Amino acid sequence: MEIIILGLLIIQKNTIYELRKIIKTKFGSMCSNSTGSIQATIKKLLENGMVVFIEYVENSINKKVYMITDEGKKYFLDNVSKPMFNKEKNIELAKFFFMGFVTPDKRIDLIDSYISQLKANKKYFNQILNSAPDKESATASYMNYLKENGLIKNFEKMLSSKSVLCSVQDIATFQYASLDLIIAKVDFEIRWFTDFRKKLTKI
């Protein structure tokens, strides 16, 4: 979760409430979106000097807006520059592994239930994809945000030779591709479990 929060804070400053909303919407398949988990991660990042916050009062409510530090940017970039590892772990698949212990009359229902959940997830992620602006519009909108908040220079510090515009376009490319990947994985599971269900009914 550290990398997700730092990445979001590189893009823009956020309150814990805003972070939770983004994580719940866009990263629910990757990590917990509980307030407790986010607060614990923020606390650790604060202790390590990777984030700071400013506090203000709005409508008689105290609010803290968190921002990433240079140390946080370095830690983030060091980590995202390393190769990915396949660390997907779904403890729920243990139920499938041991489903042979379940009485035959219940197995189809259990698999049908899982397929229904997968289809609901696919619908949810497609709604996110369909409601998102196209990459060009998203890039233009974020460039305006950087300019209006005087963050262009801060953003340039993280770049090598590319322009800020090219870097923002690259960021958008990988973010949209990540959503495509999630949908493709869900599609694969739907097809796989549907085919397995057909085989199971023939046994």
Image (cartoon, rainbow, N blue to C red):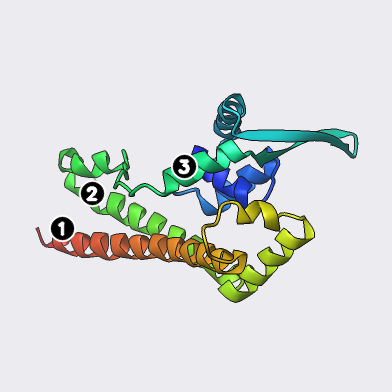
Please tell me which of labels 3 and 2 falls first in the chain. Answer: 3
Please tell me which of labels 1 and 3 falls first in the chain. Answer: 3
Q: Secondary structure at mark 3?
A: loop
Write down the residue under mark 1: 200
Structural crowding at the residue carrying mark 1, measured as other residues with C-alpha within 10 Å and reported as few (<14), some (14–19) or many (≥20): few
Which kind of residue does numbered mark 1 sit on?
A: Leu
Q: Left or right: where does residue 108 sit relative to residue 174?
A: left
Which kind of residue does numbered mark 2 sit on?
A: Arg
> Could you say which is closer to the camera, residue 53 or residue 191?
53
> Could you say which is closer to the camera, residue 149 or residue 179?
149
Up-down relation of residue 165 to residue 76 (above or below): below
Residue 4 picture location, percent across and down: 52, 45
Dot label at residue 107: 2
Q: Gap in Å between the C-alphas at discs 1 and 3?
A: 33 Å
Residue at image location 19% in from the left, 64% down from the top: 198
Residue 185 picture location, percent across and down: 34, 60
